[in-house]
Amino acid sequence: RFPELAQLYVKRAVEPGLAVLVAYFQEHPELGLQDPEVVARIFRGSLASFALVQDILQGKRLVPMSRERYISGLVETVLSAYQQKPKY
């Protein structure tokens, strides 16, 4: 309905955040990530979904989970999945 606002949001919020994550993952080859950009998008999308459900859709009351637990589980899951060197 408002494509200009969506594009502005992506340019000002999504793009810079992804760039930071991609750069971080690229600067840490010891993480063993084959595609830092894909991992960054998975990571960011998962965090956005968590915030949406917990904060906007009242998930804190219905399906509560601490941010610390969620982020810890996300990091563990993403790293273990990508460090297994999947074959595309």
Image: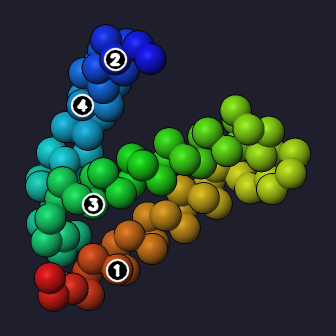
Labels 2, 3: front one: 2
In terms of secondary structure, where does tag 2 sit?
helix
Answer with mark 2 or mark 3, whichever residue precedes in sequence.
2
> To which residue does mark 1 refer?
81
Marker disc for residue 15: 4
Q: Are marks 1 and 4 in contact (CB under 8 Å)?
A: no
In terms of secondary structure, where does tag 4 sit?
helix
Horizontal side of 20 relative to 45 (left or right) equals left
> To which residue does mark 2 refer?
3
Q: Amino acid at mark 4?
A: Glu
Q: Are marks 2 and 4 in contact (CB under 8 Å)?
A: no
> To which residue does mark 3 refer?
39
Tell me the crowding category of disc 2: few under 14, some 14 to 19, or many 20 or more residues within 10 angstroms, Cα based.
few
Answer with mark 1 or mark 4, whichever residue precedes in sequence.
4
Answer with mark 3 or mark 1, whichever residue precedes in sequence.
3
Task: Indicate the quadrant where residue 73 lies.
Answer: bottom right
Q: Are marks 3 and 4 in contact (CB under 8 Å)?
A: no
Labels 1, 2: front one: 2
Tell me the crowding category of disc 3: few under 14, some 14 to 19, or many 20 or more residues within 10 angstroms, Cα based.
some
State the image coordinates of residue 65 (x, y, percent, origin top left). 74, 56
Q: CA distance from mark 3 to mark 4?
A: 14 Å
Tell me the crowding category of disc 4: few under 14, some 14 to 19, or many 20 or more residues within 10 angstroms, Cα based.
few
Image height check: is 86 above or below 44?
A: below
State the image coordinates of residue 74 (x, y, percent, origin top left). 49, 64
Q: Are marks 1 and 2 in contact (CB under 8 Å)?
A: no
Q: Amino acid at mark 3?
A: Val
Can residue 9 be seen at all in this image of the molecule?
A: no
The structure residue drawn at horizontal position 15% and vertical position 45%, both measured from the top left corner, is 23
